[in-house]
Amino acid sequence: MRVLVVGGGGREHAIVDALRRSGAEIFAAMANQNPGIRRASKDILLVNVTAVDDIVRWASAHRVELAVIGPEGPLEKGIVDALESAAIPTVGPSRAAAQLETNKEFTRELMRDQGIPGAPRFWAFDDLASFEKFVSASDFEFVIKPLGLTGGKGVRVWGDHFTTKEQALAYGKEILTEKIGGVARFLVEEKLVGEEFSLQAFCDGHTLAPMPLAQDHKRAYEGDKGPNTGGMGSYSDADHLLQFLTPKDFEGALETMHKTVAAMAARGTPFKGILYGGFMATKDGPRLLEFNVRFADPESMNVLPILEDDFVETCQRLTEGRLPASLRFARQATVCKYVVPMGYGSRPKAGEQLKVDEDSIRQSGAKLFYASVDEKAGHLYTTTSRSLAIVGIAANLEDAESISEEALAFVAGSFYARRDIGKPEVIQKKVERMRRIREGR
Ligand code: AMP
């Protein structure tokens, strides 16, 4: 099977790896030359991944039979509609269904109008005067979210990024005048308190097949400090749940996703692709922070390596509307740690050489997924984005974490990685914190 993969990050390397396990021939379209993807591909196209027409023409010329889209950018541009018009079945939502991610207000209104459980209270603003009125009357903490795509970096949370009403007003004004996220409009949501988790699912328009739960770490530094990033690493547990969650939390999150999928089908824009909910477990149950309409990065690297069902067949069934309601994943724990340039999150230092001992990493039992690196004369250098990811996989979290650390020792150079991700004592703290939140302490 000839498969197009769009995107050149760690997530897409994990997608390519899973496709190769089921015998696919890869045709990869990406902006950067990901060395892992390049080596696994029959052919590559170096292109801005939002250049939909160029990618579709190239895929057609290569007689591609299936496509998997990694990032949200091309989905927002309608790449799935274009590929399907060219008779290439695609794992990804139509432009209309991609609004679940690309238009936060659309999602909030859908949830409100269809009575879908799990949404926080929200308000939308496009003029400063009404925001000023809201702020002066409010007596609770809130979160400000630009509309449009900001790579998870435009959201500001009361207590983390600002602490006064004046600062809230200043940020609202900045969004309106500078059109942060591309539009002069933003959402305000009540601030939720709890632990975040990610639920990814395959979806064929009607049936949802969930993947193991995972937890990302968005903050740049250990102890969840520092600026928000695209994600520094993530872990998943052998039972596919997370220790700080109850089975009811998982069921609640899945119900939110099921009802959303049903509502999308009912309005004539069925959702086909990968639906990934970013949830906050709160004392009142799980609340949806955001939907994403693609695999998560890094959490895709936790779940794809342990998928036991044939990935190509799963993708085909998804595009044909015959997805089974459950898929098999190995009962293994995983810990993913991103290697990033020094200063990532604020002022990343590009151009530092990284030496990667791939054989030793493989022998340690870890998986290596490349992301953004520059390759010059056979040497690898950092860019301003995340460089590569190491994933430890084992029967329990403690061993998976040890393996990830063992493998990280085979990456040399000037880089940063969060060493705390997946450590048993760190997870224990989350369990205790969540217990206190549930007890209202
Ligand atoms: P989003 O892009 O909407 O997922 O937001 C990015 C990050 O901001 C999330 O991962 C949360 O850490 C935080 N966040 C977003 N919405 C809320 C909320 N309503 N309450 C508390 N934190 C939030």
Image (tube, rainbow, N blue to C red):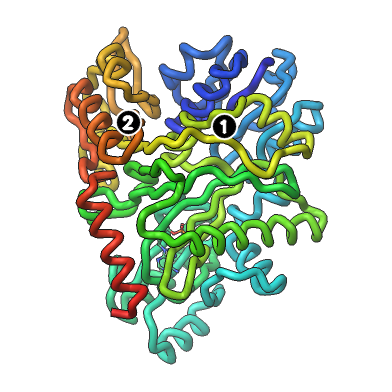
Q: Residue at x 73, y 51 (%)?
A: 96
Q: Residue at x 55, y 17 (%)?
A: 20
Instruction: Give above or below for 356 relative to 112.
Output: above
* Residue 60, image x, y percentages: 74, 19
Residue 353 can be seen, yes or no: no
User: In terms of depth relative to the viewer, which is nearer, 109 or 74?
Assistant: 109
Residue found farthest to the bottom: 137
Instruction: Give above or below for 200 relative to 400.
Output: below
User: In terms of depth relative to the viewer, which is nearer, 403 or 374?
Assistant: 403
Disc 1, disc 2: CB below 8 Å? no
For the residues labelled 1 and 2, the Cα–Cα distance comes to 30 Å
Q: Residue at x 52, y 84 (%)?
A: 130
User: In terms of depth relative to the viewer, which is nearer, 120 or 435?
Assistant: 435
**Where on the picture, by quarter, is residue 258?**
bottom right
Q: Is residue 185 left or right of residue 426?
A: right
User: In terms of depth relative to the viewer, which is nearer, 107 or 252?
Assistant: 252
Q: Is residue 148 left or right of residue 407?
A: right
Q: Would you call the spot at circle 2 few (<14 residues within 10 Å), some (14-19), or many (20 or more)?
A: many
Q: Residue at x 51, y 58 (%)?
A: 250
Q: SS at mark 2? A: strand
* Residue 271, image x, y percentages: 71, 49
Instruction: Give above or below for 264 relative to 235.
Output: below
User: What numbered label is drawn on residue 49?
Assistant: 1
Q: SS at mark 1? A: loop
**Image quadrant of ligand 1?**
bottom left
Q: Would you call the spot at circle 1 few (<14 residues within 10 Å), some (14-19), or many (20 or more)?
A: many
Which amino acid does the dot numbered 2 rest on?
Answer: Gly
Residue 89 can be seen, yes or no: yes
* Residue 154, image x, y percentages: 42, 58
Query: Upstream in the sequence, badge 1 or badge 2?
Result: 1
For disc 2, the marked residue is 392
